[in-house]
């Protein structure tokens, strides 16, 4: 069948072994624009959070003992989406690499037969990445000059065998007849594998590993060969269990080694005792939910990830630029949220009527300047005016626009800003407050002659997808940067399902909101992201009960 330009295009994307940082730049760019994402069980929440919020998310995840959706049905599903959605971007997101025992070839053949255009986006295979995160190189000079990847796969196929050569990579596929007797499920050339001097890496073989180890020993492999089981590699729950070939079976039972896990055999395993680096990071093994708005979360996400945490970005609010308006009540224009006020548009030309401009959030800064520039003005309209900021984060955002602050309170709250302006400016100073639609009246009560312009609107996120709810439920802690994020999180989440009720908060108002909803709180010393990250690290490194 000839290719049709009227179909959507399918991308077979390797998601890597779990850590979202291992997703390729190409894969990320496609997920951000995908209309449909068909994903597997082993794709981590961190990777799924990179998908477009508008994408249709389809879970076809396979469990070790049964298929949620059969492979043949997945193949047809990809064709269906492409045919029924002309011009759409359909992402098939698979753990590891699509063509390394990922059955991506089968999906590609189905697409070719249907005349659907496709592209393969390779991923980092767990066979190499997971040992690396455990400090085990799959090859090392003087120890192993080849590595060999073997997988147990529940499909009857002929074993593929290649000659063992220096610096070679051999991919062998195991034949399974789904027999309860492992010896009937495997069709491996154990004699050649036993003679192999390179590193042996077994994927998805935990259930058969006792039998595999015994057969390798029977065929002459040294029973003392170092071996490591690595569970849930590159995720917060990664665990490495050391053994030898002769103790493999008993170790699996004693240590309760479970899938997903890989098994690596050879002299390189010993290097893991010295080179393990991931487990030494201060936030290694922690899953943290960051609730900042999507465009603001990247900074703290990058810092927490670099410290070893898995971060699930879960914005609770989103902001929308609006033309400035205030709520008018004749004869004054003191703004608040009372129902008897009427919203009135204002003009940037009116800025000449104010002496001080006070910004209370980074959103206010961004939205004010975007609308200012869109209206044909530039920063020259601020000449001669004093600029006030609620805190260091907002002050830093103003600097990005070339604006230096004249007033920043030590107490980075609305109350702190109001008290500072009360103290340093005269009663006759004309103060303009640039805020969002959900701002409270703290500043207006302290500065009754001030005028408030609403320069952005805050909209709550209406719902969370099922995969994100599951990820949040097992998180170690929630990171809150605003009271509104806490309130919306409590409204749309099932708080009773959380394994942990720990929260890290920035600012006293955020802390108060979290406590109101039953969270245990740890609050940053300062209302800055640097201080918040520092507090998170201190909490976990100094002891959770310190």
Image (spheres, grey):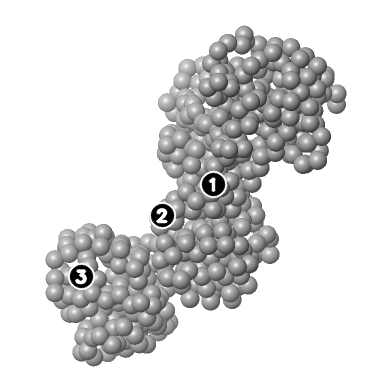
Q: Which mark is residue 299?
A: 2
- Kindly report the distance in space between the C-alpha atoms of the residues bearing marks 1 and 2: 15 Å
Label whose residue precedes the other's in the sequence (1 or 2): 1
Q: Are marks 2 and 3 in contact (CB under 8 Å)?
A: no
Q: Residue at x 54, y 53 (%)?
A: 282
Q: Which residue is mark 1?
A: 46
Label count reads: 3
Label whose residue precedes the other's in the sequence (2 or 3): 2
Q: Which mark is residue 348?
A: 3
- Location of residue 252 in the rendering, given as x and y in whole percent from the top left corner: 77, 36
- Please name which of the two marks, 2 or 3, marks the residue nearer to the observer: 2
**Mark 2 Cα-neighbour bin, 10 Å: few <14, some 14–19, many ≥20:** few
Residue farthest along the top direction in this orientation: 163
- Location of residue 82 in the rendering, given as x and y in whole percent from the top left corner: 51, 31
Q: Residue at x 63, y 30 (%)?
A: 269
- Kindly report the distance in space between the C-alpha atoms of the residues bearing marks 2 and 3: 31 Å
Whether residue 499 is visible to the viewer of this picture, yes or no, is: yes
- Which one is nearer the viewer's eye here, 245 or 301? 245
Secondary structure of the residue carrying tag 1 is helix
Asked if residue 401 lies left or right of residue 197, the reply is left
Q: Is residue 311 above or below residue 101?
A: below
Asked if residue 125 lies left or right of residue 328, the reply is right
- Please name which of the two marks, 1 or 3, marks the residue nearer to the observer: 1
Secondary structure of the residue carrying tag 3 is helix
């Amino acid at each position: 069948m000839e290719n049709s330009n009227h179909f959507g295009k399918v991308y077979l994307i390797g998601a890597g072994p779990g850590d979202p940082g291992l997703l390729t730049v190409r894969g990320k760019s496609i997920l951000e624009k995908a209309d449909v994402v068909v994903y597997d069980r082993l794709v981590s929440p961190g990777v799924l959070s990179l998908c477009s919020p508008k994408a249709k998310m389809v879970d076809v995840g396979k469990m070790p003992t049964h298929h949620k959706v059969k492979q043949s049905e997945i193949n047809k599903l990809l064709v269906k989406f492409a045919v029924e959605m002309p011009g759409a971007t359909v992402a098939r997101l698979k753990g590891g690499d699509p063509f390394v025992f990922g059955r991506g070839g089968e999906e590609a053949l189905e697409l070719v037969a249907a005349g659907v255009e496709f592209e393969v986006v390779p991923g980092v295979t767990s066979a190499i990445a997971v040992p690396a995160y455990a400090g085990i190189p799959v090859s090392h000079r003087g120890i192993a000059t080849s590595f060999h990847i073997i997988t147990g796969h529940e499909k009857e196929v002929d074993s593929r065998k290649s000659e063992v050569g220096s610096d070679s990579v051999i991919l062998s596929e195991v034949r399974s007849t789904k027999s309860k007797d492992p010896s009937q499920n495997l069709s491996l050339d154990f004699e050649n594998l036993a003679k192999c001097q390179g590193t042996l890496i077994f994927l998805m073989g935990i259930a058969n590993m006792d039998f595999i180890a015994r057969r390798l020993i029977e065929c002459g492999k040294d029973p003392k060969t170092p071996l490591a089981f690595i569970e849930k590699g590159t995720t917060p729950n990664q665990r490495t269990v050391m053994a030898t070939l002769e103790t493999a079976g008993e170790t699996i039972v004693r240590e309760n080694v479970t899938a997903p896990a890989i098994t690596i055999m050879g002299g390189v395993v010993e290097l893991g005792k010295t080179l393990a680096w991931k487990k030494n990071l201060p936030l290694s093994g922690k899953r943290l939910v960051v609730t900042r708005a999507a465009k603001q979360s990247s900074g703290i996400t990058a810092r927490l990830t670099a410290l070893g945490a898995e971060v699930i970005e879960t914005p609770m609010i989103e902001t929308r630029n609006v033309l400035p308006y205030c709520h008018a009540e004749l004869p004054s224009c003191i703004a608040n949220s009372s129902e008897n006020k009427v919203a009135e548009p204002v003009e940037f030309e009116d800025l000449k009527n104010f002496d001080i401009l006070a910004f209370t959030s980074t959103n206010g800064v961004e939205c004010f300047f975007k609308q200012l520039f869109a209206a044909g003005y530039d920063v020259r309209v601020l000449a001669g005016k004093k600029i006030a900021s609620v805190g260091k984060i907002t002050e830093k955002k103003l600097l990005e626009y070339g604006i230096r602050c004249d007033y920043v309170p030590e107490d980075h709250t609305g109350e702190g800003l109001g008290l500072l302006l009360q103290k340093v400016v005269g009663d006759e100073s004309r103060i303009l407050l640039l805020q969002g639609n959900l701002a409270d009246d703290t500043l207006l009560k302290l500065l009754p002659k001030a005028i408030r312009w609403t320069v952005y609107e805050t909209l709550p996120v209406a719902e969370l997808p099922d995969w994100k709810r599951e990820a949040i439920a097992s998180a170690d802690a929630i990171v809150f940067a605003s009271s509104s994020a806490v309130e919306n999180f409590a409204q749309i989440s099932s708080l009773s399902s959380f394994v942990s009720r720990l929260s890290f908060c920035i600012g006293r108002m955020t802390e108060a909101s979290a406590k109101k909803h039953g969270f245990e709180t740890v609050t940053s010393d300062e209302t800055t992201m640097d201080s918040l990250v520092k507090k998170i690290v201190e909490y976990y490194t100094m002891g959770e009960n310190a």
